């Protein structure tokens, strides 16, 4: 073999990035379903009957949970939710009917952050467990205060990070936790969808709507996979050239952590050909999920043994909401923090805060 001959060159397939076919194998069984307590009769009160509350209540009803009271400043909204989902519950326009009520052990507080934080504090001081809508807080210092208060009172404080129980994301997380792909070296999310539904709503007034509101689910997913290991975050946000919505519908973030990298890319002005993909790469395998939207996803696990394609049951809406409350109720029974505990959620919020700062300044943000 002479130097410089064709024999010294890589095989043509190496240049063409041709992958070997993987043989089908049986999918490993992992527990990805929403957790549920042994006792589903724990009395729950919901504060804030607008917006997303329908998903909470529908999930709780289907899971056989016990909502005993619904409060909203607009009594007709509370009554409407009550009549549709829990006809025997109390409907009121006074939060005082729920906070401190000895007949209500858990409060699901769905208000926006500014109005929610004072109510969470009051509920914790009154001795009630709390499920907070996401984002948990806008101020990390306030979040730590609330977490410390809950722990001092011996109470559970969880966050409605319902994406954790989207079947595809939950399966991936649990497969990683079980060590099925080894050490995680890459996490990559790419979503193309149309977020222009926010036109004319309060969400349009949020300048970086994608990073500030939508992306928390995927920063939280990233945190659930790599833990509190992120070192730097670099993000950008902008408006698509032809969009009519005032807020920025395009955003992306790159996250570096020891031994790995992550990317989150959000194209919220995709009018045609929506697509949602998630990839987690490890030293022993790769997990991949793709589909046209959040509810239709096909998951694969590829290792040296071959490729497994689990047939997953359920939907993000509304299994994710059942999981968020179910995990809290299990935590109340066992005394162990749920995986959606507010203290852990502060890790996710730090990633969001860093991405927001980076997008505004144009510079990467160091977390350590």
Image (cartoon, helix red, strand yellow):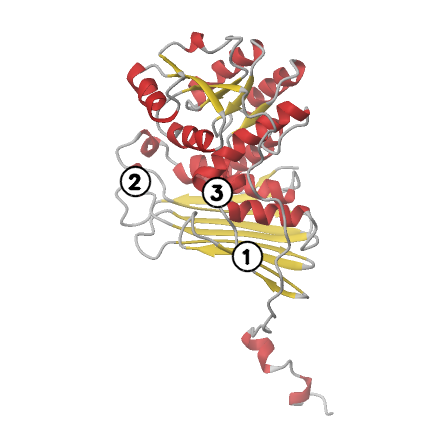
Q: Which of 150 and 107 is in front in this view?
A: 107
Secondary structure at badge 3 equals loop
Mark 3 and 2 residues: CB-CB less than 8 Å, in contact?
A: no
In the rendered image, the quadrant that contains the C terminus is: top right
The answer to whether residue 358 is left or right of residue 198 is right
Return the mark for residue 288: 1
Position of residue 10 measured from the top left corner of the image (x, y, whole percent): 64, 80
The answer to whether residue 93 is left or right of residue 337 is left
Q: Which of marks 3 and 1 is in front?
A: 1
Mark 3 and 1 residues: CB-CB less than 8 Å, in contact?
A: no
Q: Can residue 161 be seen in this view?
A: no
Q: In which quarter of the image is residue 1?
A: bottom right
Return the mark for residue 16: none
Position of residue 210 measured from the top left corner of the image (x, y, whole percent): 41, 40
Q: Nearer the viewer, residue 171 or 124?
A: 171
Secondary structure at badge 1 equals strand
The answer to whether residue 315 is left or right of residue 49 is right
Return the mark for residue 197: 2
Q: Nearer the viewer, mark 3 or mark 2?
A: 2
CA separation in Å, label 1 and label 2: 28 Å
Sequence-wise, which precedes: disc 3 or disc 2? 2
CA separation in Å, label 3 and label 1: 31 Å
Q: Residues within 10 Å of mark 2 (few under 14, many from 20)?
A: few
Extreme residue toward the bottom, this view: 1
Q: Mark 3 points at which residue?
A: 362
């Amino acid at each position: 073999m002479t130097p410089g001959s064709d024999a010294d060159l890589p095989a043509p397939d190496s240049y063409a990035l041709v992958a070997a076919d993987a043989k089908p194998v049986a999918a490993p069984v992992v527990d990805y379903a929403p957790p549920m307590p042994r006792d589903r009769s724990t009395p729950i009160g919901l504060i804030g009957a607008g917006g997303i509350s329908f998903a909470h209540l529908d999930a709780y009803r289907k899971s056989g949970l016990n909502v005993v009271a619904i409060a909203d400043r607009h009594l007709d909204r509370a009554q409407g939710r009550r009549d549709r989902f829990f006809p025997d519950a109390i409907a009121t326009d006074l939060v005082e009917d729920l906070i401190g009520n000895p007949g209500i052990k858990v409060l699901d507080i769905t208000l926006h952050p500014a109005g929610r934080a004072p109510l969470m504090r009051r509920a914790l001081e009154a001795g009630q467990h709390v499920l907070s809508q996401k984002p948990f807080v806008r101020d990390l210092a306030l979040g730590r205060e609330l977490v410390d208060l809950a722990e001092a009172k011996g109470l559970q404080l969880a966050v409605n990070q319902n994406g954790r129980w989207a079947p595809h994301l939950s399966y991936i997380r649990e497969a990683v936790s079980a060590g099925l792909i080894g050490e995680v070296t890459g996490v990559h999310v790419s979503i193309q969808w149309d977020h222009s539904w926010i036109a004319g709503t309060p969400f349009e007034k949020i300048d970086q709507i994608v990073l500030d509101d939508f992306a928390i689910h995927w920063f939280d997913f990233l945190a659930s996979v790599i833990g509190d290991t992120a070192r730097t975050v670099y993000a950008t946000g902008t408006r698509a050239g032809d969009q009519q919505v005032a807020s920025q519908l395009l955003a992306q973030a790159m996250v570096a952590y020891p031994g790995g990298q992550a990317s989150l890319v959000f194209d919220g002005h995709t009018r045609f050909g929506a697509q949602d993909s998630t990839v987690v790469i490890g030293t022993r395998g790769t997990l991949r999920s793709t589909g046209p939207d959040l509810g239709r996803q096909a998951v694969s696990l590829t290792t040296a043994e071959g490729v497994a394609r689990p047939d997953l049951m359920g939907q993000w809406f509304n299994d994710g909401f059942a999981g968020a409350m179910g995990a809290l109720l299990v935590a109340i029974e066992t005394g162990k923090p749920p995986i959606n505990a507010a203290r852990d959620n502060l890790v996710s919020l730090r990633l969001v805060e860093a991405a927001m700062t980076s997008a505004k300044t144009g510079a990467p943000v160091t977390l350590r």
